[in-house]
Image: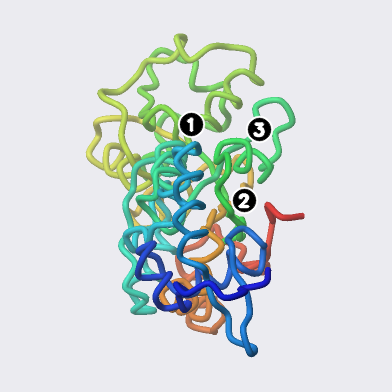
Amino acid sequence: MNCGDAPDLMTVMEVADYLRVRERTIYELVRTQRIPNCKLSGKLLFPKRLIELWVSQSADYPQAATHLAVPPQVIAGSHDPLLEWAARESRCELAILVEGSTAGMHRLLAGQAVACALHLIDQTTGQYDASIVAKSLPGLDVVVIEWAKREQGLIVAPGNPLKIGAVSDLRHRAVRVALRQEGSGGALLLSKLIKDAGFELSDLKIAGERVSSETDIAVVVREGKADTGLAIEAAAREHGLDFVPLQWERFDLAVRRVEYFEPPLQRLFAFARNQAFRDRAALFGGYDVTNTGGVMFNARR
């Protein structure tokens, strides 16, 4: 764009202040040709009149302001002990908000988190397909990064007194089953496993109210309020319980692209590349961190 003789030209810093976003966001908008700009003597400038018009036109897209604004420094979504530990030890200054994969994606879409932790299985294919994220986050520029692979199974009391060995054993009316909240990755996986075994959730003897994390499943089993529940091996080990392995899953982080390059997430992923992280994953048990940091989905490809 030719700046011509336009008197009101804004710098990158000024337009970032005007839009209340980071300068990095402005450079990203320029790179992807999504904001009016021009160069004068090699300097990047923004005609104020065109910026105001661009903002006005963006009002036709209700989520535009949300997607540009700087979100709270929060990773929302599903619970993971290794992520929780790494966020603390890396001093990345990111808070963890545990609320389930689906709720976390809604928070990411609403501009209330920099990332969402999720493990959503495709009920038809049985795969952890990151394209589901793109369909659930319309218009949001995200990448999906693998955090770890985790072993999911049934947590049982020490010695496994009811001799639970498979999902089919949950049908026995003497078995009290703890459930995760609806919309969580754990709830979706259990639903698929039950369906594949040829019965329905209504066939189970449900133990109390639904719980909100992997750790909560282990706690209710340890306290004798349930006989079993679906969770990861790390949760069973942490509470001295036995574990019946069922399958491996992929646990991902859906990240706003601009935020990925900011210091908090960069510190977290840098920490996940060191030996201390790998040692802790081995200590927790039931983790494969071989591909931690790998890009599983890129919305621009």
Residue that label 1 marks: 163
Q: Are marks 3 and 1 in contact (CB under 8 Å)?
A: no
Instruction: Look at label 3 and name its amino acid.
Output: Asp
Q: How far apart are marks 3 and 1 (CA)?
A: 30 Å
Residue 237: where, in percent of width, then height?
Answer: 40, 56
Q: Position of residue 95 (x, y in %)?
A: 30, 62
Quadrant of the drawing holding the N terminus? bottom right
Foreground pick, 157 / 119 = 119
Provide the residue designation for mark 2. Answer: 250
Nearer the N terminus, badge 3 or badge 2?
Answer: 3
Q: In which quarter of the image is the C terminus?
A: bottom right
| Residue annotated with mark 3 | 122
- Check the image and tell me how it is coloured: rainbow
Does 80 sit left or right of 4 as displayed? left
Q: Which residue lies furthest to the right in this view?
A: 301
What count of labels does the image hold?
Answer: 3
Question: Depth check: 234 or 58 in front?
Answer: 58
Q: In this view, does 167 lie above or below 213?
A: above
Cα distance in 3D space between marks 2 and 1:
28 Å
Of marks 3 and 1, the one in the foreground: 3
Q: Residue at x 58, y 53 (%)?
A: 141
Which of these two is toward me, 233 or 139?
139
Residue drawn at the location 66% of the way across and 62% of the way down: 33
